[in-house]
Amino acid sequence: MAAIDDVDASGPTRALPGARPALLLLLAINLFNYIDRQILAEVEPDIRKTFFAHAAPASAPAASHVPWAHTQTGMLAPAFLLAYLVMAPIFGWVADRASRWLLIGICVLIWTLASGASGLAATFNALLISRVVVGIGEAGYGPAAPTILSDLYPRSHRSSVLAWFYMAIPVGSALGYLIGALLKPYGWRYAFYSVVPGGLLLGVLCLFMRDPARGQADPNAAARQPRKAKLRDYLTIFTTPSFMLDTAGMAAMTFAIGGIAFWMPDYLEGRAGSPEHVGIVFGVVVAVAGILATLLGGIVGDVAARHLSGAYFLVCSCAIFISVIFVLLMARSPFPRAWVYLFLAVFFLFFNTGPSNTILVNVIHPSLRVTAFGINIFVIHLLGDALSPPLLGRIIDHYSAAGPDAGWRAAFYVVSAFLVVGGILWLWGARYLDRDMRLATRPLHSDPVTP
């Protein structure tokens, strides 16, 4: 990781003390976060067989023939996300007033123990409840973590730094697929047990970290001297066009990524090889494409922002439009050629991770950021991946009667439509970004500005 150079004359010009340990610890926690999420996706076919095989007709060879079985197991993802999105704004409000590290540590311990309980579940309802508790735990981490980094790194390099942090999404997702695939011979329960030791260690480490001063890395003295926020200040979050359009675009992208991530292992089985082989290859594809795209997207966002108005939005929009092309090509191509299109689709889906989250940080006052991230999490998951797994599962089940691939193609067309909507929303947001970044450094309680 390169050192932060002197680039911002109006505020701190380099990473502040404690920045690197905080980034490494938050990155490790985020890694375990996404390992746990995608382990579920990888072992979903085995969970379906465990809990629904008894409902299959005697002539059916596998639980995949149970009517609406995909729809039922598709509810495991939104069970987690429902708790996550409801609690995220609440924990965000708390974290704007209390120690963020203490909240993160407690919540990491909660979700780690709940992940272990997922492996102990004797019934499908027990598994469903354990995923709800995982969502509650992760809700305390998601909004607070990026705001800690924004208080330790200057604005001009936040896209690159957040790209390092969010690199845990593709790496953790890939490791989730790989761990799930490697532990399949021992049973799907051991996949959930595997995350417990590391998660407990990381949760304890958080309890020894100290919160950075809010706004200390921002370029304006008013932002570096936060005051207690009032109701009128929180309302400015909803009147900031850049925040609202970025959140809407992220919701569309989250719908697509959530649906693809959950159902892709099932789609690949029987089309690209044995389940163990497919899980490993898909994990490598997600890891390599995701790492390259996330880091490169963060760098491109920061460099473009020095020369182009609304650059972070434009980078996001261009990448997501390109991803649509490769999603459609992958859906209509045979393997092994489809692996190439899948790699490129994943690459351009992850390219906007750093820039899109940098927009959220830069257009909101430091005293409101955790709450704003909580609101963002609520919206993008409510309208995104809380809907997509069961909805796409329903589409797959419904259209499969027309042919073995008809259901899957219909699902990919829906995903592509949401990606196009996201690209349009991000393109729209570019006109507001520079103005909203300037307004974010004003003192709290200032008069609102009408767009």
Image (tube, grey):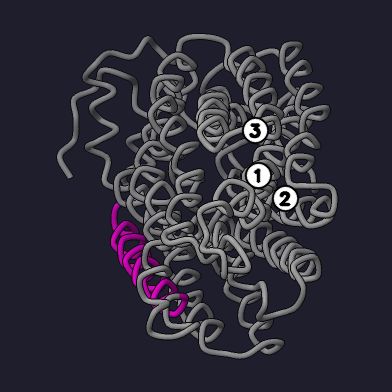
Q: Label 2, on which residue?
A: 176
Q: Position of residue 279 (x, y in %)?
A: 74, 64
Q: Is residue 217 above or below residue 72?
A: above
Residue kind at label 2, given as amino acid type: Gly
- Say which residue appears at 38% left-offset and 84% top-offset: 402
Q: Position of residue 134 (x, y in %)?
A: 57, 29
| N-terminal-most mark, 1 or 3 | 1
User: Picture quarter containing residue 21?
Assistant: top right
Residue kind at label 3, given as amino acid type: Ser
Check the image and name the residue furthest to the left: 450
Question: Tag 1's secondary structure?
Answer: helix
Q: Which residues are magenta?
A: 408-432
Q: Nearer the viewer, mark 2 or mark 1?
A: 2
User: Picture quarter containing residue 150?
Assistant: top right
- Front residue of this view, candidates 118 and 36: 118
Question: Tag 3's secondary structure?
Answer: helix
Q: Label 3, on which residue?
A: 118
Check the image and name the residue furthest to the front: 58
Q: Are marks 2 and 1 in contact (CB under 8 Å)?
A: yes
Question: Tag 2's secondary structure?
Answer: helix
- Say which residue appears at 44% left-offset and 85% top-offset: 403
Q: Nearer the viewer, mark 1 or mark 3?
A: 3
Can residue 18 be seen in this snapshot?
yes
- Say which residue appears at 52% left-offset and 82% top-offset: 331
Main SS, magenta residues: helix
CA separation, marks 1 and 3? 15 Å
Q: Is residue 120 magenta?
A: no
Q: Classify 10 Å Cα crowding around label 3: few (below 14), some (14-19), many (20 and above).
A: many
CA separation, marks 2 and 1? 7 Å
- Front residue of this view, candidates 75 and 20: 75
Q: Label 1, on which residue?
A: 34
